[in-house]
Amino acid sequence: MNELWFPAIESQSVVGRFIEVEVVHPAKSREEGREVRIIRPALESKVAGSHDTSVQAVKPFNEKALQARFPGAWEHFEKTRGPAEKEQIVAPAVGTPLDRLDFIPREKLLWLKMQGFSTVEQIALMSDATMQNLGPGVRQWRKKATQLLQKG
């Protein structure tokens, strides 16, 4: 993953980088009658030295402003991402959707999706190292996900 952070135009203490995130495309989801996910660029920003980050999707109405605020970050993103379409449709995950995990709060489910998880099976099969990286409480999530899958 690209770990370079670039300062904002207005303050050296605010840093950002452009990343790609997977999001639900509401219109395409309605058309197809199932959840359709796409990959979009987003701005990840934080106060330098902090671990708390904010992620803001790059959309037509804010694209120019975000690029102007973090020009070095956008240039780096364009160079490293390679040739890509504006929107890439993500193949649907095979397995039980994460939304079945009613014991995990909605905001944590969204966070897990941003970390790359899309199925209950991925949670149930995650390694100890991955659990440590994700933080406290994840071991319990893995245990409950495994139980949910065993119930069928």
Image: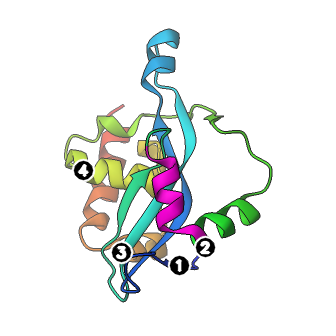
| Residue corresponding to mark 3 | 46
CA distance for labels 3 and 1: 10 Å
Q: Are marks 2 and 1 in contact (CB under 8 Å)?
A: yes
CA distance for labels 2 and 3: 15 Å
Q: Are marks 4 and 2 in contact (CB under 8 Å)?
A: no
Q: Secondary structure at mark 2?
A: helix
Image position, residue 122 (x, y; %)? 48, 50
Image position, residue 141 (x, y; %)? 29, 57
Quadrant of the snapshot with the C terminus: top left
Note whether residue 146 is visible: yes
In the displayed structure, would residue 39 be above or below residue 24? below
Q: Which residues are magenta?
A: 62-72
Q: Nearer the viewer, mark 3 or mark 1?
A: 1
Q: Nearer the viewer, residue 9 or 135?
A: 9
Q: Nearer the viewer, mark 4 or mark 3?
A: 3
| Residue corresponding to mark 4 | 107
| Residue corresponding to mark 1 | 6
Q: Quick check: 77 left or right of 111? A: right
In the displayed structure, would residue 12 be above or below residue 30? below
Q: Quick check: 32 left or right of 72? A: left
Q: Are marks 3 and 1 in contact (CB under 8 Å)?
A: no
Q: Secondary structure at mark 3?
A: strand
Q: Residues within 10 Å of mark 3 (few under 14, many from 20)?
A: some
Farthest-out residue, right: 83
Counting residues from the N terminus, which is met first, the one under dot 4 or under dot 2?
A: 2
In the displayed structure, would residue 32 be above or below residue 52? above
Q: Nearer the viewer, residue 34 or 30?
A: 30
Measuring 37% from the left and 81% from the top, which residue is drawn there? 11
Give me the disc on residue 72.
2
Farthest-out residue, bottom: 49
